[in-house]
Image: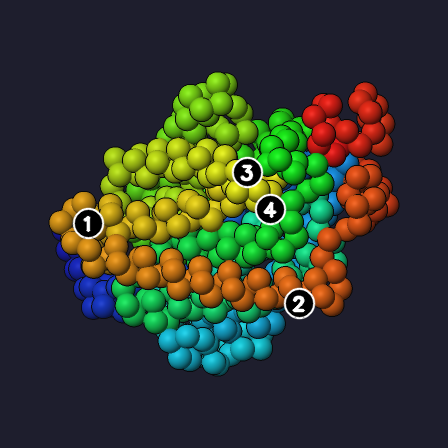
Amino acid sequence: MYRKLLLTILGGLTVAGGAWAADPLTLDKIAADNATLKVGLDTLWVLLAGALVFFMNTGFGCVESGLCRQKNTVNILAKNFIVFAIASLSFYVLGWGLMFGNGTGFIGMQGLVGVTGADNSPATGDAYQGVYKAIAWAGVPLWAKFFFQLVFAGTAATIVSGAVAERIKFSSFLVFSFILVAVFYPITGHWIWGGGWLAAKGMWDFAGSTVVHSVGGWAALAGVLVLGPRLGKFSKDGKVHPIPGHNLTSVFLGVFILWLGWFGFNPGSTMSLGDGKLVAHVFLTTNMAAALGAITAMATAWVMLGKPDLTMIANGCLAGLVAITAPCAFVSVPASLVIGGIAGVFVVLAVIGFDKARIDDPVGALSVHLVNGVWGTLAVGLFAKDSVQPGTAGNGLFNGGGLTLLTNQFIGVVAVGGFTFVGTYIVWMVLKAVMGIRVTAEEEVEGLDIGEHGNEAYPDFVVTQPAGIHSGKGGVN
């Protein structure tokens, strides 16, 4: 009996010894499996975040159509629908290569047609150098990187849609959108995110206050100036005639969709779940800036306009989101409250200011994306705190970092703004000369839904006011 028990113990020790001898191989396999699992989880995160940003097109469509008149609803929804399809093609064909291809400090020169090497790249992007070294830091497959950057490019083009609403030709908007995403957006994007000269100088924009939002804003401003205001918006004596939107329920829904989508826009820009603390931090700074933007916009409108205007509250939330997009990973949560709060004040002042300047922006896109894209970029230079993400932007002015970072941010704002505004203004002028960019006065009065698309969003609506006049104040309906 004892002999049998001893043999059993010795046999067990022999088996255990064999297992211990195999430990190094087992550990290597575990390490490999863990690496594969990390790539899989990071890829899932990037694609889900990208899908949230993609869904923001719905939010933009709801906000823009709701803030405009019902007779132009089909046109606005059609623009917001097709613009992502246009962006997908133009960014794939040329934009991606110009933005992330290896090249000079000003432009990508390699991998310009299509996405070179994506089908043959290894699973981990950090192991893939190829011709896109600027984005090799992210350890997800190249196609995941492309899709995530694509939805950002589409957002820049969508911003233009709202500012030029209710009077632009559908065909001209499509051509402009293709050019913006194929050329202007990726060139300035290369300067900052593609390893270009602004990145080398020390400018930081984590998720796109400048790269996405102010680029779309500058392009929109150029378009608005070339197009001119809507009929009836301004009288000859300088009086501003408000033209209210037709569906604030749509605006409410759209802003909440955009707020949700921003949790992909900003946190997704980590392109990894490896640093969970950073991802959670960006979630919170994003949310708090949006919340304070809504609150301060409400308060500012209440004081200046006498009522807590819902459209101002909505745009205040969006202004806070735009402003925090650049600094979300570099500033503390209390700083995000300040940044969002200031954005909410800025957006109300900007809406009023653009009206006084006779610049007609039906949805407040310039006030939200341009003004607060600039503010958010400069906020990095003021509020950045090195302890939030060590070794990146460093400390801003208010944290003992001096003027260096703020100066670099300012240079980036001016360079990107100047290039985008001048370049897109020329494009708008060429389009105006070649194919025209504005519908006829008759089409504008009747509504672009009929003139441009031959159908209506609400065919059973009953018009209860005189045709062509809005509220008896001289505004064209």
Camera-near label (4 vs 2) is 2
What x and y, as percent, mark residue 130?
43, 79
For the residue marked with disc 4, what is the amino acid? Answer: Ala
Label drawn at residue 163: 4
Q: Is residue 239 toward the left or the right of residue 31 in the image?
A: right
User: Which picture quadrant has residue 343?
Assistant: top left
> According to the image, label 3 marks what residue?
355
Instruction: Name the secondary structure under disc 1.
Output: helix
For the residue marked with disc 3, what is the amino acid? Answer: Asp
Instruction: Name the secondary structure under disc 3.
Output: helix
For the residue marked with disc 1, what is the amino acid? Answer: Leu
User: Which picture quadrant has residue 235?
Assistant: top right
> According to the image, label 2 marks what residue?
430
Q: Is residue 93 toward the left or the right of residue 390 in the image?
A: right
Residue 313 vs residue 260, the one in the foreground: 313
What x and y, as percent, mark residue 407?
26, 58
* Residue in view at x 69 percent, y 29 percent: 246
> According to the image, label 1 marks what residue?
397
* Count of labels in the image: 4
What x and y, as percent, mark residue 173?
68, 56
Whichever of callouts 4 and 2 sits on the residue coming sooner in the sequence is 4
Look at the numbered discs 2 and 1 and tell me whether their residues touch, using CB distance below 8 Å.
no
Look at the numbered discs 1 and 4 and tell me whether their residues touch, using CB distance below 8 Å.
no
Q: Is residue 280 toward the left or the right of residue 394 in the image?
A: right
Whichever of callouts 3 and 2 sits on the residue coming sooner in the sequence is 3
Residue 361 vs residue 226, the one in the foreground: 226
Whichever of callouts 1 and 3 sits on the residue coming sooner in the sequence is 3
Camera-near label (1 vs 3) is 3
Camera-near label (2 vs 1) is 2
